[in-house]
Each structure stands twice: as C-alpha cells, then as structure tokens.
Amino acid sequence: DTGVSQDPRHKITKRGQNVTFRCDPISEHNRLYWYRQTLGQGPEFLTYFQNEAQLEKSRLLSDRFSAERPKGSFSTLEIQRTEQGDSAMYLCASSIIAEIYGYTFGSGTRLTVV
Amino acid sequence: AQSVTQLDSQVPVFEEAPVELRCNYSSSVSVYLFWYVQYPNQGLQLLLKYLSGSTLVESINGFEAEFNKSQTSFHLRKPSVHISDTAEYFCAVSDQGAQKLVFGQGTRLTINP
C-alpha cells in the first residue's frame, strides 16, 4: 500500500464546468476526509466519511459540492458550475484509530478555474 | 468548536540557529495536537503529535513540541535547523473523538545559509 492517492494532480477548467476528483485511501482506513487549501492558508475541513456514511459537512461545502464514498472505499468530490473562487488545492486524508496513528494525507488535486 | 492560531506567518532563521514556531489553540474539550510539515510541492506529512502522557513529544528529525495546557499552547522547537527544514509548518487540533483536524494558518520557515 503506497498511501493515499488522489487523481488528477492538476485540473484546469473553465468557469461553469463540472469537475470530479477521486481519492483512494489506505485500504484498511475506515475514515476519509476532504480538505481545501488556498494559497497561504491552512487546510479547511470540508467533509468526512466513516466507511460509506458521510458524517459531517462543513458550511464551506455549498450545494454545488457533493462527495460520495460508495462501498466505503474510494471517494469522489464533485464541484458543479465551478467558480473562480473554487480554485484551490483539494486534499484527501484517511485514518484508522486516528488518535494513535494520525491522519495520512494525499498529495492533493490542484484546481484552477479560468 | 476548536480553533488554532499560529502567531507567525513567516519565520526566517540562519542555518544552525534555534527556532520556535508558536501555536495556540482554543477548545472546550480535551484535544489531540499535531504538527504537520509541507515541503514545497508536496503533501502534508505528520511531524509529531501529542495524545496523552508526557507533555514533551519529539520527532525523528530533531523537532520537539511541548503541550502546555494552562497556556493552551503547543509550540514547536528545534535547537539547530538545516536548509532541508525549509517548509510550511501547520499546527492542528482535533477533539478526542478524532473526527476532524482543525488547522492553523501555517508558518513558513525559511532557512538562510
């Protein structure tokens, strides 16, 4: 297992288009988190799953954003009708017994909306 | 709700000098504390964490952090920095349900030769 994988690494899209990102967590990790990081800021929590259940969503996650984790394995984050303000690095992390082992982050997907 | 404040957005130091990156948190419940490091063009990597027990925690590359409950702080220190320590450092807190991390704004550590 090579860690948390995110695809694509970079995405450039035109304003108004829909985009979808994928995250493959470490296989035995039951929790999966999405964060957004803008330039010069710390990561901001978006949502998290325990297995296939989405347990919490941030107010940052507007109705244009949707996340899924079918079967409790990989997860997708979709942004509909992208806006320039959506340009950011989208980070995925996974964990199991986070209080002991911490969280493992992927390298992120950098979204640029033009 | 938890929050984290990293008091310095940038810290420039000379190589082999000591450094301290400051972190204060607020929370109404017991927390776990973390420091993550982000090297240029790379993802976040866990540097060290405080869960319980000894208030002084150490990383394998010479960093240490001390949990101070009365001052709600978790400052990161290294007695002698190297050029390779150049990175962005993020302090983070989670409640003891470990449901999500709340990050500070980050501190950019720049090492000058």
Image (cartoon, coloured by chain):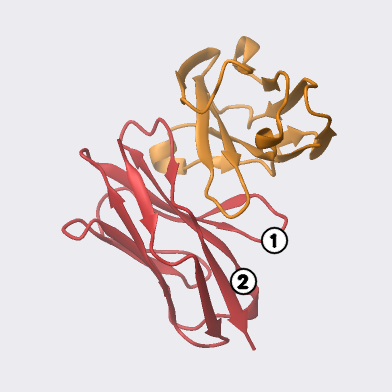
- Of residues A102 and B87, the one drawn nearer to the viewer in this rendering: B87
Which residue ends up furthest to the left in the rendered image?
B70
Q: Which of A59 and B113 is in front in this view?
A: A59
Label 2: chain letter: B
The chain coloured red carries which letter?
B
Q: Chain A appears what colour?
A: orange
Location of residue B108 by image quarter: bottom right
Mark 2 residue type = Thr
Q: Where is residue A73 in the image (x, y as percent from the top left)?
A: 64, 19
Q: At which x and y percent is residue B104?
A: 44, 51
Quick check: B39 above or below A24? below
Give the residue pinned by disc 2: B86
Chain under numbered label 1: B
Residue at the (40%, 68%) spot, across then down: B64
- Residue type, mark 1 in image: Pro
Image position, residue A49 (x, y; %): 51, 20
Q: Is residue B82 left or right of residue A50?
A: right
* Neighbour tally class for label 2: few under 14, some 14-19, many 20 plus, Cα within 10 Å: some
Label 1 crowd bin: few (<14), some (14–19), many (20+), radius 10 Å: few
Between the residue at mark 1 and the residue at mark 2, the CA separation in whole angstroms equals 8 Å
Label drawn at residue B40: 1
Q: Where is residue A95 in the image (x, y as percent from the top left)?
A: 51, 33
**For marks 1 and 2 on the same chain, the one whose residue lies earlier in the sequence:** 1
